[in-house]
Amino acid sequence: MQMENQGRSRKDVLEDLWRILQEDEKYEEGTILSSMCTKPLPIAKTAHQMFLASNLGDAGLFRGARRLEQEAVRKLADLLNGRDSVGFIVSGGTEANLLALWAARNSANVSSPEVVIPESAHFSFDKICNILGLKAISAELDDTYRVKPEAVARSVTSRTVAIVGTAGTTELGVVDPIPSLSKIAKTHDVYLHVDAAFGGLVIPFLEPAERNALAFDFSLEGVKSITVDSHKMGMAPIPAGGILCRNQSLLNHIKT
Ligand SMILES: *Cc1c(COP(=O)(O)O)cnc(C)c1O
């Protein structure tokens, strides 16, 4: 049997895919007005293609890819003032938030665990609370759509395993008062997770005065973990999100 009789030609398949691709809106045509993602950098596309067969689930075989992952994590950690922080590149912000709350839940080890989450938080937290058996306690916003620290403080109980704050909400790009949340977390000895999926690769590049007014990273002592999506403002191909933990001991809680 000849090869060309098996299946469809490459040309046919590519033509089909090209037609299907025309159904998608394109960044360069200006018809995408509210996406958090961007077109990947050309070099990022090439890099992605070079490592398509590398499986980080088997780091012993794919040592180079593992080293690259660690380097990417190190670079993100440096941007976020995480001197001892460790982490992974995962499928996106949703998985990163899941890993963070998983670590928080396991490290607290309380029954009927709760998480205090701003009303403006990303919808992934609803799914994550369902998956992890966490009760979401919703904290209200002020009239600038930032979470009210008093509302967060009021919602903390002995069952609280984490407080969540957002650095760059998906809809409005608003940054919660993370320094205040950090103080509350320290006072109550509760885990603070910062979801910077969207803002984590924007805020570090602002002018110093603006950046200081939007403090959200590991320089705040209460911050235990940060989500930062390379496939949003980092111009990496989808899927690539980062999860960083302040130190290795937190990650030990999700070793299975
Ligand atoms: C996009 C986003 C997420 C989810 O990230 P995915 O990469 O889509 O899984 C979580 N939080 C915020 C604030 C986001 O903007």
Image (spheres, rainbow, N blue to C red):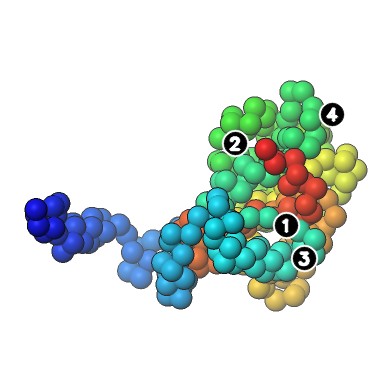
Locate residue 51 relative to residue 159 in the image: left or right: left
- Earlier along the polypeptide chain: callout 3 or callout 4? 3
Residue 223, percent from left and from top:
78, 52
In terms of depth relative to the viewer, which is nearer, 110 or 181?
110
Residue under the image location 75 percent in, 75 percent down? 208
- Earlier along the polypeptide chain: callout 2 or callout 4? 2
Please name the residue that numbered disc 1 is placed on: 86
Crowd class of label 4 (few under 14; some 14 to 19; many from 20; radius 10 Å) = few
Task: For ligand 1, tell me if the residue under mark 4 lies within 8 Å.
Answer: no
Residue flagged by tag 1: what amino acid is it?
Val
Residue projecting furthest to the top: 112
Please name the residue that numbered disc 2 is placed on: 128
Using the rendered image of the protein, determine whether residue 246 is visible from the camera's viewpoint. Answer: yes
In terms of depth relative to the viewer, which is nearer, 130 or 165?
130
Q: Secondary structure at mark 4?
A: loop
- Earlier along the polypeptide chain: callout 3 or callout 1? 3
CA gap, disc 2 and disc 1: 22 Å
Q: Are marks 2 and 4 in contact (CB under 8 Å)?
A: no
- Earlier along the polypeptide chain: callout 4 or callout 1? 1
Q: Secondary structure at mark 3?
A: loop
Please name the residue that numbered disc 4 is placed on: 158
In terms of depth relative to the viewer, which is nearer, 119 or 83?
83
Residue under the image location 73 percent in, 68 percent down? 78
Reply above or below: 46 against 108.
below
Q: Are marks 3 and 2 in contact (CB under 8 Å)?
A: no
Residue flagged by tag 2: what amino acid is it?
Ile
Q: Which mark is residue 81?
A: 3
CA gap, disc 3 and disc 1: 12 Å
Residue under the image location 60 percent in, 39 percent down? 125
Crowd class of label 3 (few under 14; some 14 to 19; many from 20; radius 10 Å) = some
